[in-house]
Amino acid sequence: MIRITRKVEFSAAHYYHNPQLSAEENRRVFGKCNNPHGHGHNYVLEVTIAGEPDPTTGMVLDLKELKDILQREVVDRMDHKHLNYEVPELKGKIPTSENLAALIWKLLDPKINNGKLDRVRLYESEDLFADCTRESTNGAGGRG
Amino acid sequence: MKISLTRRYRFAASHRLHTAKLSDEENRRLYGKCDSPHGHGHNYAVEVTLTGPVDSKTGMVANLGDLDPFVEREVIEAFDHKYLNEEVAEFRTSVPTTENVCREIYRRLEKFPAARLERVRIEETSKNSFEYEGERSQDRP
């Protein structure tokens, strides 16, 4: 099996706020990320596809095709947007890197027809990233 | 699907690779310039990976407001600008290779209460990196 990874970048604004918590609790839990005016990041998304190279083309999938999918599903949806207000799929969710990586997985997984989506890695900054992978089949993933 | 969160930290420290179990000659042959008696240093980068359910209240696997001070207390304060051989108790009896530093940092961070520690990865230089995931593969279902 071969894994190929494509990188794409987008910039977006967000803030963290849970309407079920008091203003005081929001400040305590989310700290400066709770600033209601929002703040932004240059997100770097790495998408990894796993599969066997096609014997004719030598490719797991055509990177041009992957580039188009990433543009359509992620960049067009999120680049230069406010994630709290302009991405309906995140409605009711706090736009953390974890939730964003999970959404990107859900958007991309059904669109990848050659090879299988293996990992979504979303960097919020060079010091913080979230990974989303398929649940491991032996039940070892995640704590109960 | 499984979600994990990775946070990167940095510290600078000195060390010397040398074991009392070998002769001076053998130490020099095995560790080369890393055996230099006055020690040498690196800018270490430590990636800490946590996994677990995403808390619906916070949208997070782990709150950095909890994780950052925990890592600061358990690792950075103990390792940053220190001579690992002398100033970190573990390395009085084991060689502070980055393999062993990985294990020691994993041991210190494993008790983080809010999510499961999946991996500690350390870049000793831009060319060398080391990873430790604990010994759980045998003792977990």
Image: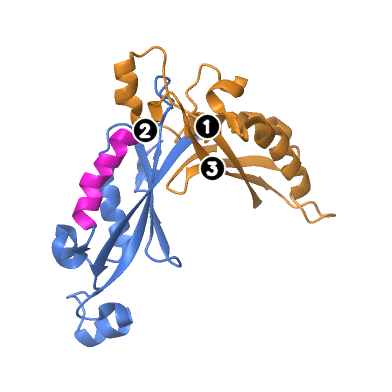
Chain colours: A orange, B blue
Quadrant of the rendered image containing residue B73: top left
Which secondary structure class fits the magenta region best?
helix
Pick whichever, A86 or B134, lies toward us.
A86
The answer to whether marks 1 and 2 mark residues whose Cβ atoms lie closer than 8 Å is: no
Q: CA distance from mark 1 to mark 3?
A: 9 Å
The kind of secondary structure element at disc 1 is strand
Is residue B1 among what the camera can see? no
Q: The C terminus of chain A is located in which quarter?
A: top left
Query: Circle 1 sits on which residue?
Result: A13
Q: Chain of mark 1?
A: A
Query: Circle 3 sits on which residue?
Result: A42
Identity of the residue furthest to the bottom in this view: B25
Circle 2 Cα neighbour tier, 10 Å, few/some/many (<14 / 14–19 / ≥20)? many
Sequence order check, earlier mark of 1 and 3: 1
The magenta stretch is B63-79
Query: Circle 2 sits on which residue?
Result: B62
Q: Nearer the viewer, mark 2 or mark 3?
A: 3
Instruction: Give me the residue at 54% from left, 42% from top.
Output: A42
Q: Which mark is residue B38?
A: none
| Amino acid bearing label 3 | Asn
